[in-house]
Image (spheres, grey):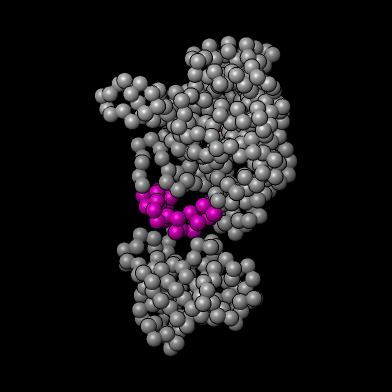
Amino acid sequence: MDRTYIRSLYAAPESFGGGKVELRGWARSVRDSKNIGFIELNDGSSQKNCQVVLDREALSDYEKIVHCGVGAALRVRGTVALTPGMRQPFELRAEEVEVEGPSLPTYPLQKKKHSPEFLREIAHLRPRTNLFGAVFRIRSQAAFAIHKFFNERGFVYVHTPIITGSDCEGAGAMFRVTTLEPGETDISKDFFGKRAALTVSGQLDVETFAMAFSNVYTFGPTFRAENSNTARHAAEFWMIEPEMAFCDLAGDMDVAEAMVKSVAEYVHETCAYEVEFLSERVCPELKDRFEALKGGDFVRLTYTDAVAVLKKAVSEGRKFEYPVEWGCDLQSEHERYLTETVYKKPVFLTDYPKEIKAFYMRLNDDGKTVAAADLLVPGIGELVGGSQREERLDVLERRMAECGLNAEDYGFYTDLRRYGGCVHSGFGLGFERLIMYLTGVSNIRDVIPFPRTVGNLEY
Ligand code: 4AD
Ligand code: MG
């Protein structure tokens, strides 16, 4: 008999009613009420379990089965009985149960709610919980939705390198890649004969493809050696970076907004049960978040106006830990005040002071600000960082010098302005932050399978 997946049973219970099936999965709970037993079986194809009913009379090895232990792998053959009006639309009346591998009585995941902190210590077992089942099913659907969004719009998917010789963000927060032994300092003897590092962004590489294909994106792992131990920073995270030729900052924001809305819609559609579960268990505002994304435009506000809004709030008695002055980098408390208290929806902040942004952002006519756009969302803060790129060679070279970059390392980048340079824009969206936003999970460590953070490299 072929294996049936629990997902198929839920998709069309009537077509299975009265028929025989074989399920393979793991016991999420086992209950023995003398002559009748119940196993909640999960096979990973669905967030939902199938209830398996065990009849002592009908099963010669009943005792062994009801003592298989939570977590045991089972093969169950039986008849699907429809149970209209019950919590589950069907159950499986077992006729034959094989315990494929027993679980130990000390199995760490018993049928109760475990804290995310405890589950982080057993990250190899946590995918088996309802919480991580929901989060990682959503993560998978969201990744697919991103490719679908770009593919349907004719964007070319580009695989940018992970090992790089240039520093995109110019912040120096890079992990070095070397084959030199400790003490060896002659860089010419190193594997590449020059300094190498893990990429902090695929942007510079993907810009080269935008100048040939017009609309491109990269979606891959990114590494930052920042010493920020927060709930929103990881040393290894995934980033989606589209880049569009002949597109200005307004067009850039249009793409970011359409993409976030489209991914949210796809997740809401395909993971309705998971979203329901997470809004009950983790984040009561989650369903409102999805509703808000369906209607209404995101706010677009300049940095200068945002500073005015924040200063007004301070003058009216609002307390912030960090002061707000034009020119300062906004702190997460400021970002959250704007999205959660003032506008109650996603907000694009644009035209930041050039001093707090990267060298490649296009200088505005005021000479003080750059054509940047960060998207801030409730509950998370910064989700997207993007900009129109500086396409004027002389201005770009001046900015690079001001930022202390070595022009020789960026020859390929300035060439893009020499040959067919044009107005173009792009952005980077932190995939884990998007998953936090779509699941309501508040710590980045719980939306990536094996988190890498300062001082933590388990598994
Ligand atoms: O704002 P960032 O640094 O922008 C760039 O890297 C640009 N080169 C992107 C581009 O224009 N192509 O990073 C982009 C996004 C942030 O908004 C944030 O969501 C996420 O990446 N991010 C992180 N996510 C998790 N952990 C970290 N340490 C992150 N640093 C940035
Ligand atoms: Mg940023």
Q: Quadrant of residue 10?
A: bottom right
Inspect this view and state whether residue 86 appears: no
- Is residue 103 found inside the magenta-colored segment of the image? no
Q: Quadrant of residue 253?
A: top right
Q: Is residue 12 left or right of residue 188?
A: right
- Residue drawn at the location 43% of the way across and 35% of the way down: 235
Residue 316 at what x, y percent from top left? 62, 25
- Residue drawn at the location 58% of the way across and 81% of the way down: 19
Q: Residue furthest left?
A: 183
Q: Quadrant of residue 391?
A: top right
Main SS of residues in magenta: helix
- Residue drawn at the location 56% of the way across and 21% of the way down: 412
In the picture shown, does residue 147 fall above or below 299?
Answer: below
In depth, the one of 431 and 152 nearer the eye is 152
Residue 435 at what x, y percent from top left? 55, 45
- Residue drawn at the location 63% of the way across and 14% of the way down: 393
In the picture shown, does residue 406 fall above or below 274?
Answer: above
In depth, the one of 130 and 389 nearer the eye is 389
In depth, the one of 395 and 453 nearer the eye is 395
Q: Where does the magenta region start and end? A: 114-137
Residue 81 at what x, y percent from top left? 57, 80
